């Protein structure tokens, strides 16, 4: 058995997380600088990537890194409409004044250079403020300084949000990786193990991200086809009876006896309280996202057996249908 497989087996049997430490450490490798990394046509919109790595577990690390970077792309700060005015002032400093401060130019036209607004630029410009105050007019410098402080603060905000988001993704990644390694078959080849772990990890991370964004993955069989996976946004319908019965039964309550109406009222109040609190965790979800309360949850809240809850619902449905 290879060293990689031994470490996985040791994690499954003894909880030794050495293999997890190895993978997560490798996540920080410079994959972009790997000379074998090439983009290929694989039928997807963005294309695929082929890369040659020294150790098989590094392919898992590469997948984690790629997904992390993809998620971090969504961490950004919206700059205001006068961003071009700030870029104009930066171009004046760089071109007209001839002060070539340390910065990255990502684009240019016949009038302007466009600079990346990052820590490199702000840290490079800060020591130059006395000189810039002399070169600009009083009003120009005051306006430039106002824009500089504003965008510097926004860039700091984005960096802080990115760091926090990266910490969240790191924690989620470890949880997803532990799940995948727990269930992988160590008797498979290392290539098959990597494929399984990457597939399972990706699915778990995607589910965690979906939940973070208020989405839920459900499995449903539709139109006689095989069961398929759907991402839906769960919600409480306006009518609470829909959560309990899937329909409005308010006009049918008169057919029930007092004990049955009292039972429905108790369930109604449970759902109503959860709706106000935004508690959706204990509810099932229809394919359109509409929530349904489970019999098990009602039993737990009322402190009675689930079988008794099911019998009560069955008798109620027999009377109102």
Image (tube, rainbow, N blue to C red):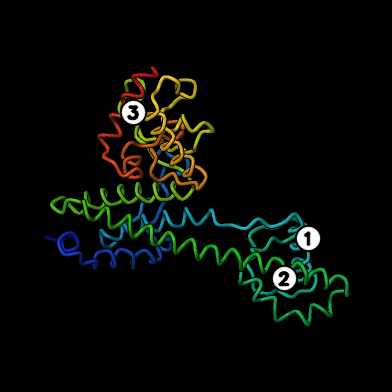
Comparing 84 with 180, the one in front is 180
Q: Are marks 3 and 1 in contact (CB under 8 Å)?
A: no
Comparing 47 with 159, the one in front is 159
**Residue at horizontal 44 percent and vertical 33 percent from the top:** 243
**Residue at horizontal 24 percent and vertical 64 percent from the top:** 19
User: Is residue 80 shown above or below 248?
Assistant: below
Marked residue nearer the N-terminal end (3 or 1): 1
Q: Which mark is residue 299?
A: none
Marked residue nearer the N-terminal end (3 or 2): 2
Comparing 22 with 268, the one in front is 268
**Closer to us: mark 3 or mark 2?**
3
Pointer 1 local density, CA inside 10 Å: few below 14, some 14–19, many at least 20: few
User: Is residue 23 shown above or below 247?
Assistant: below
Q: Is residue 146 left or right of residue 266?
A: right
Marked residue nearer the N-terminal end (2 or 1): 1
x and y percent of residue 46 in the render? Answer: 47, 44
Q: Is residue 178 left or right of residue 111?
A: left
Quick one: SS at disc 2?
helix
Provide the residue designation for mark 1: 85
Pointer 2 local density, CA inside 10 Å: few below 14, some 14–19, many at least 20: few
Provide the residue designation for mark 2: 149
**Closer to us: mark 2 or mark 1?**
2
Mark 3 and mark 2: Cα distance apart in space: 63 Å
Quick one: SS at disc 3?
helix
Q: Which mark is residue 313?
A: 3
Comparing 213 with 154, the one in front is 213
Mark 2 and mark 1: Cα distance apart in space: 14 Å
x and y percent of residue 60 in the render? Answer: 31, 56
x and y percent of residue 288 in the render? Answer: 46, 31
């Amino acid at each position: 058995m290879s060293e990689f497989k031994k470490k996985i087996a040791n994690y499954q049997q003894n909880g030794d997380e050495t293999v997890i430490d190895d993978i997560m450490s490798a996540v920080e490798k410079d994959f972009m600088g790997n000379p074998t990394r090439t983009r290929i046509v694989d039928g997807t919109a963005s294309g695929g990537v082929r890369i040659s790595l020294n150790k098989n577990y590094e392919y898992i690390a590469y997948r984690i890194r790629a997904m992390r970077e993809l998620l971090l792309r969504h961490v950004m700060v919206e700059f205001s409409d006068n961003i071009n005015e700030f870029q104009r002032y930066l171009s004046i400093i760089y071109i007209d004044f001839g002060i070539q401060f340390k910065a990255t130019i990502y684009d240019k036209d016949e009038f302007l250079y466009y600079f990346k607004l990052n820590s490199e630029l702000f840290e490079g410009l800060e020591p130059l403020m006395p000189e810039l105050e002399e070169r600009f007019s009083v009003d120009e410098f005051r306006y430039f300084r106002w824009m500089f402080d504003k965008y510097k603060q926004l860039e700091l905000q984005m960096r802080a949000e990115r760091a926090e988001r990266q910490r969240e993704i790191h924690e989620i990644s470890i949880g997803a990786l532990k799940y995948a390694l727990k269930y992988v078959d160590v008797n498979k080849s290392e290539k098959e193990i990597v494929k399984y772990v990457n597939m399972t990890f990706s699915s778990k991370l995607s589910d965690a991200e979906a939940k973070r964004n208020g989405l839920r993955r459900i499995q449903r069989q539709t139109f006689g086809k095989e069961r398929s996976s759907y991402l839906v946004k769960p919600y409480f319908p306006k009518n609470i009876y829909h959560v309990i019965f899937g329909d409005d039964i308010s006009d049918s309550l008169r057919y029930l006896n007092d004990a049955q109406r009292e039972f429905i009222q108790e369930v109604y109040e449970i759902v109503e309280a959860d709706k106000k609190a935004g508690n959706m965790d204990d509810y099932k979800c229809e394919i359109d996202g509409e929530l349904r309360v489970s019999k098990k949850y009602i039993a737990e809240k009322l402190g009675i057996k689930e079988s008794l809850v099911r019998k009560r619902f069955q008798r109620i449905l027999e009377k109102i249908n």
